[in-house]
Each structure stands twice: as C-alpha cells, then as structure tokens.
Amino acid sequence: MGKGRSSGTCGSTSQEVTMTTSKLLVVSVLSLFLAASSPAQSEQPSAYPERGTVTAMTARSVSPGMVLGPNQGITASVSRRGYRIETDKEVYIVSERSRKQTMTLGQMIEFRIAKGYLYTPNVKGKENKYRVIGEQMRSAT
C-alpha cells in the first residue's frame, strides 16, 4: 500500500472523525444547556416571592438652592418619589429612581428584595428597581 487514501469503503480520515466528534460535542452541550434552562422558565412566577400593597406615596419635589458665585451655577435639592409598601409581616419604605410614577396608591404588587433594593416586574418583561430606605416589622393591631 502506498501513500494516500485506501480504496476501501470506509475511507474516513482522522480529520473527518475529529470534525464529527466536535459536532456531536457541540450538539450535546447545547441540548444540556437548553434542558437546564427549561425548569427556570417554569419557576419564573416564584422569582417574586413577596406580595404587598402600596399604602402611601410621597411626591417628587425640587427645592430651590443657592447661587454659589459667578459662573458657578445654582444648586438645588431634589427629593425622589417614595412609596410605603405593606406586607403581612413587614413595612418597606422605598425610593424611586425614575422620574415617572410606576406605582399607584392601593396597588397590589409582587416583589423581591436583594442587596438593599426592591425589584418589581413591569409590563415590558423587565424589572423596576427601588432603593429600600426603611424597613420595619408590622405592628400587630
């Protein structure tokens, strides 16, 4: 036998075997990834384990500041809109980052708390983020 391919029916080269093995590996990894992500989609409703009611709101306000000097501008104090959210066990006071009002008085919301922020789902499939500025146990009345 000489150099080159043999004339048999199984004429696979080592490159073809390697490419086929690589393709099978990629398909296996992708199918494992898809199978692992499927249960996460069914668990989406539990991503917001807490429920509460918006019981109070504070308005966003801007108070006039003072002139610092020529060509230095004017300072102003801005307070953000805030909400009081009551659950069965706790009361949260949160501050809104957005200029738009995203919650209404009496609204029932689902939320989660993580690292000092309260997150609620919005209609666009994303989350609204609020800074938690106060938290206390609800009094038993």
Image (spheres, rainbow, N blue to C red):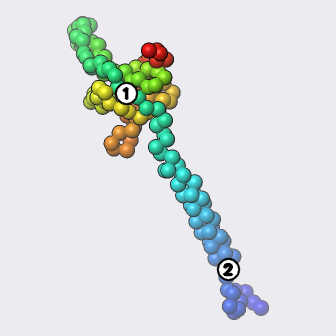
Identify the image quadrant of residue 83. top left
Residue furthest front in the image: 141
Q: CA distance from mark 2 to mark 1?
A: 68 Å
Three-letter residue code for mark 2: Thr
Q: Residue at x 43, y 20 (%)?
A: 91
In this orientation, does residue 104 appear?
yes
> SS of the residue at dot 1?
strand
Q: Residue at x 23, y 7 (%)?
A: 67
Identify the image quadrant of residue 53. top left
Which residue is label 1 attached to? Answer: 53
**Would you place residue 57 above or below residue 41 in this image?**
above
Q: Position of residue 97 (x, y in %)?
A: 35, 27
Q: Is residue 34 left or right of residue 5?
A: left
Identify the image quadrant of residue 13. bottom right
Q: Position of residue 124 (x, y in %)?
A: 33, 44
- Along the line of sight, the residue nearer the viewer: 62 or 131: 131
Q: Position of residue 139 (x, y in %)?
A: 46, 15
Q: Is residue 72 left or right of residue 49?
A: left
